[in-house]
Image (cartoon, rainbow, N blue to C red):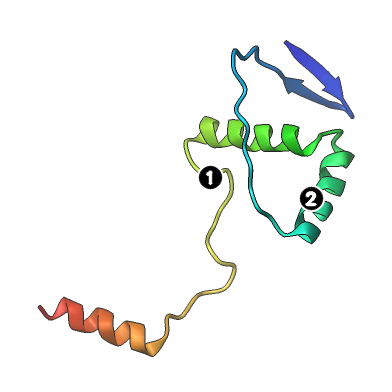
Amino acid sequence: MTRAQNGLTCATMATTTKTLVRARVDGRRKAKAELIFKRYGLTTSEAVNVFLAKVEEVNGMPFDLRPTEPVTPPKSYVGKLWDSLDT
């Protein structure tokens, strides 16, 4: 079954059970995200379901989590790592 909303076609599946998901998030981040979801005609709950469906579809995170800039570990960490390779 599909439904059209704001020019997007969303596939819906019949489910037998629903599970409550609770998360603590920054209030400003949630408010900004809700404005974006609203542009797509989605509630926060629907957006979370879209995210979880995509995670399932790609069998992983649906976006790249690598930093945009190279990360240099502190010298103390590099020294400990190097020492651990000597053994």
| Residue occupying image coordinates x 54% and y 30% | 57
Residue 33 drawn at (x, y percent)? 79, 50
Q: Position of residue 85 (x, y in %)?
A: 17, 77
Q: Which residue is located at x 49 percent, y 76 percent?
A: 71
Left or right for 61, reference 27 = left
Q: Along the horizontal axis of the image, is 30 left or right of 52?
A: right
Nearest the camera: 85 or 32?
32
Say which quarter of the image contains residue 54.
top right
For residue 61, above or below residue 14: below
Q: Residues within 10 Å of mark 2 (few under 14, many from 20)?
A: few
Q: Amino acid at mark 2?
A: Ala
* Residue at x 73%, y 35% (from the top left corner): 45
Check the picture and name the quadrant holding the N terminus: top right
Disc 2 on helix, strand or loop? helix
In the image as oriented, which residue stretches furthest toward the left? 87
Question: Whole-Å distance between the Cαs marked 2 and 1?
Answer: 18 Å
Label 1: how many Cα within 10 Å (few below 14, some 14–19, many 20+): few
Quarter of the picture containing the C terminus is bottom left
**Residue depicted at x 62% and y 14%:** 15
- First in sequence, mark 2 or 1: give its number: 2
Q: Can you identify the residue that label 1 sits on?
A: 61
| Position above or below: 55 against 4 | below
Q: Amino acid at mark 1?
A: Met
Looking at this view, is 39 or 22 the one in front? 22
Asked if the residue at tag 1 contacts the one at tag 2, i.e. Cβ–Cβ closer than 8 Å, the answer is: no
User: Where does label 2 land, which residue?
Assistant: 33
* SS assignment at label 1: loop
The image quadrant that residue 78 belongs to is: bottom left
